[in-house]
Image (tube, rainbow, N blue to C red):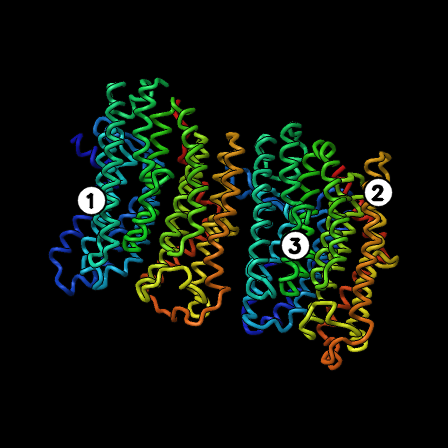
């Protein structure tokens, strides 16, 4: 009986697992006609799952502390669900021949990575954390290599797998030292046993490098542009939002809950990494011609901004972090949605191809502009609010110089976001991309993203609700 | 509170909507002035019509509104310029609807900026006003528009980054209890913090007010922008800088202002002088006016930094007068350019005979600019210099004299410009066949001249209103 209640406690994971199993069976049973409806079925199931768990339940642990649940993790899971839902809406590419009809595989592999992220953010033990991480990484490599005919896609998959394995190796090395010095792997017991001795700091650094790889902060970012460019656009968008969001939140949880004693050390590490990430990624982004590579660098710099929320170690910092992920989801997925539509129909993925887009596709370019403005932090779009709050959280702790550098970097980033806007609206083109028609799923996703960009900032309710669940470093 | 009208402006009858909308706007702001004057006689020298709605609880951000004499005056100015700007861009060519949509968004930012009393909202509206500029200049501009648009946007956003840190700094060092400017004014911020954040916010707002040496966006931006946008930008947006400087920097951090004023005074005095000198050197009409704007706007900042009530009243008067004047200039240049397709004074001449109405209007604007008594420029500059001379120390007096001497230079370039292209022989044969202004252009010009003359002839009511409000500051 008691085990049963344990399972009930991790109900969001269980229900996601049910969704995955249903899809798996459906994939096996359905004939050619059934496969036609695979996308709506997957979307419907995921939507039901999202609605069931939209509000977090009370905190607690299961399986003797292996699995711990904080309400904030519930909020983040909801955010990840929404993001995955939007990604599924945009998964038009997997209906086409180009992907060798790997429809079923795409949907449940994506959901398996999502399940991995779930475990990552609600684990109470390093081993479960590691299993979650691997569960997310390995299918992700497969997803990146999904486009069988494309060499780039295969390269992306291979690169991702190799580097992910390498970084997990480093992380495991760190974990083993942590175990060696403390004698436990439970998150709950660890803080009392961690002091600032050299061995533990080394273990900590090894461990944390593994997570930085996932978030792709500079200097752990080398894989990002190649994988983003090579993977199918839909997978890229998933990678850039869900994977990054989950990893950042997991990082925040670990730093707050387990490594609270090393706060001065990790503040120093983050301080440096944030500056380097934001600055380098911005400088590289300026030179990109391929819009997917461009967004890859933009996402690296966004990761730097997100990390600003952690650096203060306050409850408000956590609010702004989660809020930032929430806003980032809409902005980035809107951009990738437009890119995917254009890529699927014309195969064009370079920024110069977008010249004169406004004359032929006013709505698409409008959505793209909103997303660029939101990513660049222009009011009244949501991105402005999330940036402002995350800066406020860092300034509250007196990181004036850090914030000043970050804010100056937003100007650089605005420059390259404006380049895209300029290409679409200002530049003339003899042969612009022809007027495109989109299917209703894509439309729905873009409308949803646009609504998010416009409303999430102006209505304060989202941020205030998130604020209810946040907590500071446990000392 | 005035603006929701505007969101609707997106059909074929855009013009009709714009005109009714902006007339309503003018009416509303006149009504506001009347309400303000009557209420003010009861409770003098405070913010009126304040209202607050809590917005973002965790940061104590409210959507607080409130006006005093200064903001009322600025609102009037903005509404007049939006109206005249609409008239001037009567037949803007490609994408008419989009043009006015962005134009409305720009003015929304401006209006919001003047009525809010909350730091966060203030900052937000500041940025709202910036972004439409990029597209307005980039799409509808002329000359090297893409370069100018990018330069303007990036420089102003750079300024806003300083502002952001400054605003957050003020909020947290005032104990993080309220974002409302009126509340923060009652809290004493530690001096060392004041010094740091005063510098940040003053430079931040100063860039928009063309503070020397951060003014370089302004000539390029104004020269490339379409006429209505130049008008709104030079006429109103640059005033945002001055307004922000004293509403945030000086109002909230008076001690730092006292200490740091000399440094910035030197910069602004240089700016006044330098702007005027640069204007002499230009041949393009828009560049001449843009540099003259730099000079005048620096004078605004200069006067604010004098920290006396008279000088500050003068500063606000100068903001109004320069707003009207420069809008008039840009309107005229725009209409002339539409006919001649050149803005180089060397390529024009004798236009007075061809288009007498525009010519006369141009002369009036020029005279106002160089401070002829009876027009607005005289009143405001006089007030500023009297206010500045209230300081007895040599340092400030010398700087004031330098600033005054710019009037002479202004006379040089204005008269030279007027003489070159209005009088004298006709340079280009084709120009002889050009027509004078049409009714909508005339209407816009008349409204602006009326404004200039009003400030010039009857400054008393206005300056009293401003003077009382400035009691808040000092």
Q: Distance from label 3 to label 1 (Cα)?
A: 60 Å
| Label 3 Cα neighbours within 10 Å, binned few <14 / some 14-19 / many ≥20 | many
User: Where is mark 2, residue-wise?
Assistant: B387
Dot 2: chain letter: B
Task: Report which residue position mark 3 lands on.
Answer: B218
Quadrant where the N terminus of chain A is found in the figure: top left
Nearer to us of marks 2 and 1 is 2
Q: Do callouts 2 and 1 mark residues in contact (Cβ within 8 Å)?
A: no
Q: Quadrant of residue B419?
A: bottom right
Depicted B287 relative to depicted A221: above or below: below
Q: Residue at x 30, y 29 (%)?
A: A206
Res. A307 visible in picture: yes
- Disc number lying in front (2 or 3): 3
* Nearer to me, B27 or A211: A211
Quadrant location of the C terminus of chain A? top left
Q: On the same chain: label 3 and label 1?
A: no
Is B148 or A52 nearer to us in this picture? Answer: B148
Q: Nearer the viewer, mark 3 or mark 1?
A: 3
**Could you tell me which secondary element the residue under label 3 belongs to?**
helix
- The percent coordinates of residue A286 (x first, y second) are 45, 51
């Amino acid at each position: 009986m008691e085990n049963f209640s344990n399972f009930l406690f991790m109900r969001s994971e269980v229900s996601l697992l049910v969704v995955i199993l249903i899809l798996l069976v459906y994939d096996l049973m359905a004939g050619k006609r059934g496969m036609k409806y695979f996308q709506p079925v997957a979307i419907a199931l995921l939507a039901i799952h999202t609605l069931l768990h939209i509000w977090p339940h009370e905190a607690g642990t299961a399986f003797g502390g292996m699995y711990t649940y904080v309400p904030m993790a519930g909020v983040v899971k909801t955010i990840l669900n929404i993001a995955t839902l939007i990604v599924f809406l945009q998964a038009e590419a997997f209906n086409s021949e180009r992907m060798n009809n790997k429809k079923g595989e795409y949907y449940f592999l994506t959901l398996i990575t999502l399940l991995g992220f779930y475990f990552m953010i609600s684990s109470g033990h390093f081993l479960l954390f590691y299993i979650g991480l691997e569960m997310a990484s390995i299918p992700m490599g497969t997803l990146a290599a999904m486009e069988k005919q494309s060499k780039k896609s295969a390269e992306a998959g291979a690169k991702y797998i190799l580097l992910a394995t390498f970084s997990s190796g480093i992380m495991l090395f760190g974990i083993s030292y942590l175990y060696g010095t403390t004698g436990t792997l439970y998150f709950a017991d660890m803080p009392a046993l961690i002091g600032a001795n050299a061995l533990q700091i080394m273990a900590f650094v090894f461990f944390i490098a593994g997570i930085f790889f996932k978030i792709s902060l500079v200097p752990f970012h080398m894989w990002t542009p190649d994988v983003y460019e090579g993977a199918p656009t839909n997978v890229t968008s998933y990678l850039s939002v869900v994977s990054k969001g989950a990893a950042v939140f997991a990082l925040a949880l670990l730093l707050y809950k387990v490594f609270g004693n090393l706060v001065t050390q990790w503040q120093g590490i983050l301080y440096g990494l944030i500056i380097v990430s934001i600055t380098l990624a911005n400088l590289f982004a300026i030179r990109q011609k391929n819009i997917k590579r461009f967004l890859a660098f933009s996402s690296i710099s966004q990761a730097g901004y997100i990390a600003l929320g952690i650096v203060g170690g306050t409850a408000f910092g956590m609010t702004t972090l989660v809020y930032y992920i929430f806003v980032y989801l809409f902005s980035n997925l809107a951009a990738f949605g437009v890119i995917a539509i254009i890529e699927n129909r014309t195969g064009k993925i370079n920024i110069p191809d977008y010249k004169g887009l406004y004359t032929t596709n006013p709505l698409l370019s409008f959505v793209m502009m909103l997303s660029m403005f939101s990513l660049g932090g222009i009011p009244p779009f949501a991105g402005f609010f999330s940036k402002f709050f995350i800066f406020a959280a860092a300034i509250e702790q007196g990181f004036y110089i850090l914030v000043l550098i970050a804010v100056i970097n937003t100007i650089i980033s605005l420059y390259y976001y404006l380049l895209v806007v300029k290409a679409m609206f200002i530049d003339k083109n003899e042969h612009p991309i022809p007027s495109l028609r989109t299917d209703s799923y894509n439309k729905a996703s873009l409308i949803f993203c646009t609504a998010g960009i416009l409303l999430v900032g102006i209505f304060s309710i989202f941020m205030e609700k998130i604020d209810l669940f946040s907590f500071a470093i446990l000392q | 509170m005035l603006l929701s009208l505007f969101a609707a402006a997106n059909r074929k009858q855009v013009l009709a909507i714009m005109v009714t909308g902006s007339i309503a706007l003018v009416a509303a702001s006149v009504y506001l002035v009347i309400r303000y004057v009557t209420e003010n006689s009861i409770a003098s020298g405070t913010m009126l019509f304040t209202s607050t709605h809590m917005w973002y609880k965790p940061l104590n951000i409210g959507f607080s509104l409130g006006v005093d004499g200064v903001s009322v005056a600025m609102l009037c100015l903005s509404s007049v310029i939006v109206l005249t700007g609409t008239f001037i861009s009567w037949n803007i060519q490609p994408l008419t609807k989009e043009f006015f949509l962005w134009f409305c968004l720009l003015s929304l930012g401006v209006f919001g900026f003047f009525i809010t009393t909350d730091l966060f909202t203030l900052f937000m509206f500041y940025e709202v006003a910036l972004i439409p500029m990029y597209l307005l200049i980039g799409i509808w501009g002329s000359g090297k528009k893409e370069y100018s648009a990018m330069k303007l946007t990036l420089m102003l956003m750079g300024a806003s980054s300083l502002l952001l840190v400054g605003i957050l700094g003020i909020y947290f060092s005032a104990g993080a209890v309220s974002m409302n400017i009126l509340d923060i004014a009652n809290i004493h911020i530690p001096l060392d913090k004041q010094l740091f954040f005063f510098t940040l916010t003053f430079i931040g707002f100063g860039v928009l007010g063309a503070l020397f040496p951060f003014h370089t966006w302004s000539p390029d931006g104004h020269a490339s922008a379409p006429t209505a946008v130049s008008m709104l930008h030079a006429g109103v947006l640059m005033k945002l800088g001055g307004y922000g400087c004293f509403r945030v920097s000086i109002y909230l951090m008076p001690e730092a202002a006292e200490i740091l004023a000399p440094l910035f005074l030197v910069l602004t005095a240089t700016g006044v002088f330098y702007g005027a000198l640069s204007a002499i050197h230009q041949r393009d009409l828009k560049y001449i006016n843009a540099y003259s704007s730099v000079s005048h706007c620096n004078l605004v900042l200069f006067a604010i930094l004098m920290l006396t009530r008279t000088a500050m009243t003068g500063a606000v008067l100068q903001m109004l007068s320069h707003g009207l004047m420069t809008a008039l200039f840009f309107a005229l240049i725009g209409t002339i350019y539409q006919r001649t397709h050149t803005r180089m004074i060397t390529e024009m001449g004798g236009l007075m005979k061809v288009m007498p109405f525009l010519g006369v209007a141009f002369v009036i604007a020029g005279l106002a600019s160089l401070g002829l008594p009876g027009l607005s420029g005289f009143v405001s500059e006089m007030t500023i210099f009297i206010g500045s001379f209230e300081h007895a120390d040599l340092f400030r007096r010398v700087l004031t004299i330098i600033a005054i001497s710019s009037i002479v230079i202004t006379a040089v370039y204005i008269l030279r410009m007027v003489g070159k292209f209005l009088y004298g022989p006709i340079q280009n044969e084709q120009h002889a066949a050009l027509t004078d202004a049409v009714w909508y252009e005339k209407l816009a010009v008349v409204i602006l001249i009326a404004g200039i003359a009003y400030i010039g002839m009857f400054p008393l009511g206005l300056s009293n209103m401003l003077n009382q409000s400035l009691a808040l500051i000092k």
